[in-house]
Image (tube, helix red, strand yellow):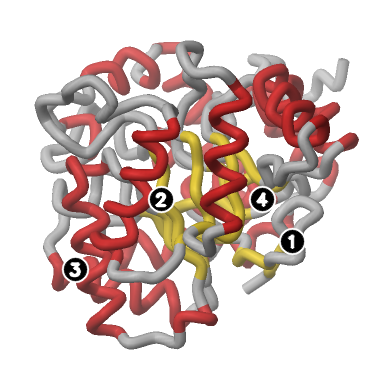
Amino acid sequence: MEYRRLGRSGLQLSVLSYGSWVTFHGQMDDRHADELMGIAYERGVNFFDNAETYADGESELMMGRVLKKKGWDRTSYVISSKAYFGSRKNLLPNQTGLSRKHLVEACNEALKRLQTDYLDLYYCHRPDANVPMEEVVWTMHNLIQQGKVLYWGTSQWSGAEIMEAHAVAQRNSLIGPTMEQPQYNMFERYKMELDYTSIFRNVGMGTTIFSPLAAGFLTGKYQGGIPEGSRLSLPGFEWLKKRWLQEDRLGKVQRLTGVAQRLGCSLAALAIAWCISNKDVTSAIVGATRKEQLLENFKALDVLPKLTSAVLQEIEGILENKPFWDSN
């Protein structure tokens, strides 16, 4: 396992991490979560990702039960939560957003659900235009000062919003955001490769990217339709179908599969390796539901050295719908 520093902080994360979005409680029970988290930990994963909104808090409860049962040394792993969407089905005022009230209460609830004394990483899950940036930054700074959080960050914020948070922090001698959690994969590249470039250069932001397989689309399993039990077959995820099941993208997946076959790997391993070949990625979060899937995801570490400049150029040509011989 390779470990990378989270931006300019001293914290080191495994370049592959394990997350619970959709899967915990939605597709897996405690037994399966216990097995997969164990496999990940044994192979060097030290970061486990979660959020208040995942399965309305049930995901954090499940991960908390597994961690208590495992009894791993708390200093050996990193655990996260995120706040914004709330953890209740019928939300009342102040049970969502980035107000001081919700951020503090959501943090306390996450600590209880995860059965831990502190969160290593705590994210503002979305920007909140209704809350002054000063309130957000001061609240996250105070949670760190209280020992409830070690590092705070953002998820799906724009580059401008992140820099505004840093400006507030600098102006008031506060702790600014250390990391961002954006979506990043072969078909979702704008934030990582364009919007955040100046932030990587100026403040050294770390990233824990999610959906490196585009919700499973980059495994190739949707080429012949939507398999039963897959993520896109779940109720409430119609938006994912609209995002990924597009004819031009299906064609690109077919061509990418050819590249993977030539390299002697699966499309999934190739797609994850492509993500972590970007050195601005601190950790790529995988969310496998089966042992076989998780082990296949780990093969990305073996594929990474095979991604020569020529291979990366060929992949770029596919993503831009160019013939592989066209280097312009």
Q: Secondary structure at mark 2?
A: strand
- Lateral position of residue 41 relative to residue 56, left or right: right
Quarter of the view holding residue 159: top right
Is 147 rendered above or below residue 84?
A: below
Mark 1 is on which residue type? Arg
Badge nearest the viewer, 4 or 1: 1
Q: Any mark on residue 81, and which?
A: 2
Spatial CA distance of label 3 from label 4 is 26 Å
Q: Any mark on residue 5, and which?
A: 1
Quarter of the view holding residue 153: top right
Instruction: Look at 50% across and 42% down and name the residue there.
Output: 123
For the residue carrying disc 2, how many other residues have a C-alpha within 10 Å: few (<14), some (14-19), or many (20+)?
many
Is 65 rendered above or below residue 96?
A: below
Residue that badge 3 annotates: 32
For the residue carrying disc 3, how many other residues have a C-alpha within 10 Å: few (<14), some (14-19), or many (20+)?
some
Q: Position of residue 120 (x, y in %)?
A: 52, 62
Mark 3 is on which residue type? His
- First in sequence: mark 3 or mark 4? 3
Spatial CA distance of label 3 from label 2 is 21 Å
- First in sequence: mark 4 or mark 1? 1
Nearer-the-camera pick, 10 or 238 = 10
Asked if the residue under mark 4 is in contact with the one under mark 3, i.e. CB atoms within 8 Å, the reply is no
- First in sequence: mark 1 or mark 3? 1
Q: Position of residue 238 (x, y in %)?
A: 22, 18
Badge nearest the viewer, 2 or 4: 2
